[in-house]
Image: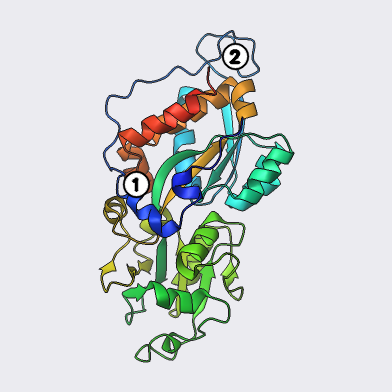
Amino acid sequence: MTEKSDTRFGNVSRRKFVTAAGAVGLAGLAGCAKRTASGSDGTDDGESGNGDSLSGNIDIYGSSTVFPLATAIKEGFEEEHPDVKISISSTGSGGGFSNYFCKGDSDFNNASRPIKETEQQECSDNGVDWVELQVAIDALTVVVNKEADWVDCITVDELKQIWEPNGAQKWSDIRSEWPDKELELYGPTSASGTFDYFTEAVIGEEDSHRQDYSATEQDRQIITGVKGSSGAMGYLGFAYYSENKDEIKALAIDDGDGTCVKPSLENAKAGEYTPLSRPLFTYPRVQSLEEKPQVRAFAEYFVEQSGKRELVADKVGYVPNDEETVQEQRDKLSEYLE
């Protein structure tokens, strides 16, 4: 039976997500018992036959935002299970769902927004079932060139004026005191969950994002573009900004009440960075959970690591799940691990 998208985020406005985000703690999950990661009888393809050891491949596609977190978790898992080889490809949330996961060609799809109804139907049509697991919280970040000394804070309405179809062409189109300088825009492609989330949270409608910008699924290309032009602006996941703070500048966001809130793990945790705080997910394929011990083990490991501050916050740059959220994800997964 297919696990439908979590109603806390899948069927409500992204602006309402802030309430849930405020409940997320930065503290790591202390004293977590390490789970075993082997199949039950040693006959599955993922069992190497030497007791607790696993072998086999795991294929993961999807979100570029979740990519650095998944990569960090992969490294720890492969250290414990060197005979398991994990391949992670950054294709965008939608690209991963439509091109691989919903066709049954991958074991996991990472996503920076909940699975869409159209994707649910595509998966269902192909007999693909899934489990939605929240793995972190992101503070989606709007960035500009370091030389853009005229702007430190921007309102959501001003972002809409820039990023909507036929949007502003110059900075002075937004505020007359800003320079008469061309806007040079960088962002993710329409296959990206970051694109979907930003479009809904800032512009307010699906398919309402301007098309005349430099689109890429490689977040570092966004950083390079913004770094290279004094009039540039882009948006991307907080982890990529946090790795490049010396090269680009993050803007504080005014959600309409006159308060400028900077993107940070603390502000995302407190529910103050609105409307650009968002949950991040991974979706294991149920059939892979049932057939491959290494996939079951990695799914468990991913959930356990999602609560570790030293990994999720300190190493990658996202807000880790609190203990309650980790337990909720364990409970959702356990149905498929019996």
**Residue 165 against residue 37 in the figure, above or below:** below
> Which structural element holds mark 2?
loop
> Which structural element holds mark 1?
loop
**Quarter occupied by residue 50:** top right
Q: Residue 221, how many percent across, how many down?
A: 53, 63
Left-right relation of 104 to 64: right
User: Residue drawn 35% across and 75% down?
Assistant: 154
Left-right relation of 44 to 250: right
- Name the residue tied to disc 2: 48
Q: Residue 90, how many percent across, how many down?
A: 58, 49
Q: Which mark is residue 319?
A: 1
User: Which dot, 2 or 1, sits closer to the camera?
Assistant: 1
Observer-nearest residue: 299 or 249? 299
**Quarter occupied by residue 248:** bottom left
Instruction: Tell me the amino acid under the disc marked 2.
Output: Ser
Q: Residue 199, how many percent across, how many down?
A: 52, 65
User: Residue drawn 70% across and 45% down?
Assistant: 122
Residue 77 in view (yes/no): no
**Residue 43 against residue 66 in the figure, above or below:** above
